[in-house]
Structures are given as structure tokens and as C-alpha cells.
Image (cartoon, rainbow, N blue to C red):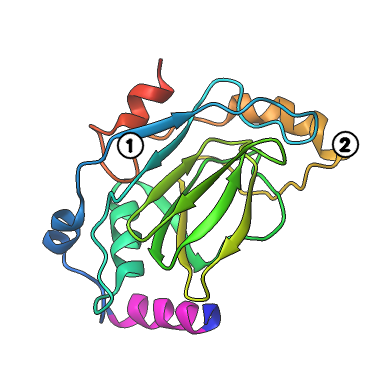
Amino acid sequence: MYLLETLMKTIETVTGRGRPLARAVRDAVHGSNAQETMFTDDGSIPNNPKLPFIHYRNAVAVSDSGNPAATFEELFKRNGWRDSWRNGIYDYVHYHSGTHEVLGIARGEASVRFGGDHGKIFEVHPGDVVILPAGTGHQCIRASKDLLVVGAYPGTGTYDECRGSPQERERALKSIPKVPLPDKDPVYGANGALLAAWKR
């Protein structure tokens, strides 16, 4: 399924077909309160010492008949979050030490543990958005067969994938605090709760 989604994205990008209009993307955004969670360093997964994890429930209207993945991609891109991809969420714990990440749930549902092995399991559903500050552990515990996630990253930062090994830790602890803050919230732009939460 994910190979097909990647092919569809490539065709949409090249031809422009299937991409939502700007107004449709704007109209798909719902107001949603930000649920903030701080995760502590567990000795393996560092998480982020200053920035909270953000969960927006039902922030984006998605439809079975439309192209929800493209809606998320356009929304994230409009707000400066790029290098988007379509896939699921890995079933092993990992984190990024050089960039923040946003995940939009386009289809299906999942139980995802954020914060590493000692973190918290969140149920995510279509239209939900989660924003992971650099260092936040994440792992899919259970997913429906139709799960489709759109991920993206701010314009600054460097993608890497860390698995919690001691060899990564020293470098990660130095790089995580240096990851620049994004210019905009990936869903709500300049007025999003993310900016207020991360600039406190």
C-alpha cells in the first residue's frame, strides 16, 4: 500500500492532478486544542528537555472519498514543513536528534507510544496531528491495516534516525537543544499553539 501511495504522490507532484486547491486545504482545518505532554529522558531515549509534544485531535477534516494525504501535504507545505512522505509509523522505538517532525493521520488508526519505552500510548485517528520536538521517541504499537500517515519536517534541521543506542546518545544530547524552532505551526501557521508552547 505504501509503495502505491508513494507512486500516487509522485504522479500528483508531476502532473498536479489530485492536489487540493488552497481553499479546500484552508477549509479542511478545524480548530483544535493542543494537548501538551512533556517526556523525560529515560536513559536511552532522550526526548526533549524543553519542548512539549503536541497532539491536535481532529484538526483536519479528512474524507474517505477525497485525497486526505494530499491535503496534509499541502497544509504542511504551506506552513513551511517540507520533505513530506506517506507511510505508516515504524514498529520500533526511534527518534530524530537533528529535526522536529509532524505526523498527520490521513487514514486508519493506531496506538502509538511517544516518549520511549516509559512514555505514553496515544490513540490517533483520521484528522489528528502530532508534533514531535527533536529527541521524542515514537513507536507504533498497533495499527489498522489501512493506516496512512503523512510526515514532514521544518525547513531547518537535519534528518537522522536514532534507535536509542549508547553510541548515539552523546551526540544526540548535544544536537537536540540546538535544533532551530520552526517559523510556523504546521497546521495553524503563525497563530498556532505550537509557537506559544515552544517559545515559553
Residue at the farthest top position:
200
- Mark number, residue 200: none
Classify 65 as above or below 42: below
- Mark number, residue 184: 1
Q: Residue at x 39, y 49 (%)?
A: 129
Identify the amino acid type marked 2. Answer: Pro
Does residue 81 appear to the left or right of 3 in the view shown? left
Where residue 138 sits in the image (x, y, percent)?
62, 47
Mark 2 lies on residue? 166
Which quarter of the picture shows residue 46?
Answer: top right
- Which one is nearer the viewer's eye here, 16 or 127? 127
**Start-end of magenta stretch:** 4-15
Q: Is residue 105 magenta?
A: no
Q: Residue at x 28, y 55 (%)?
A: 75
From the viewer's perspective, is the residue at label 1 or at label 2 nearer?
2
Classify 99 as above or below 125: above
Q: Could you tell me if residue 188 is visible in this image?
A: yes
Where residue 171 sits in the image (x, y, percent)?
78, 32
Q: Is residue 12 magenta?
A: yes
Identify the amino acid type marked 1. Answer: Lys
Q: Which circle's residue, 1 or 2, is located before the other in the chain?
A: 2
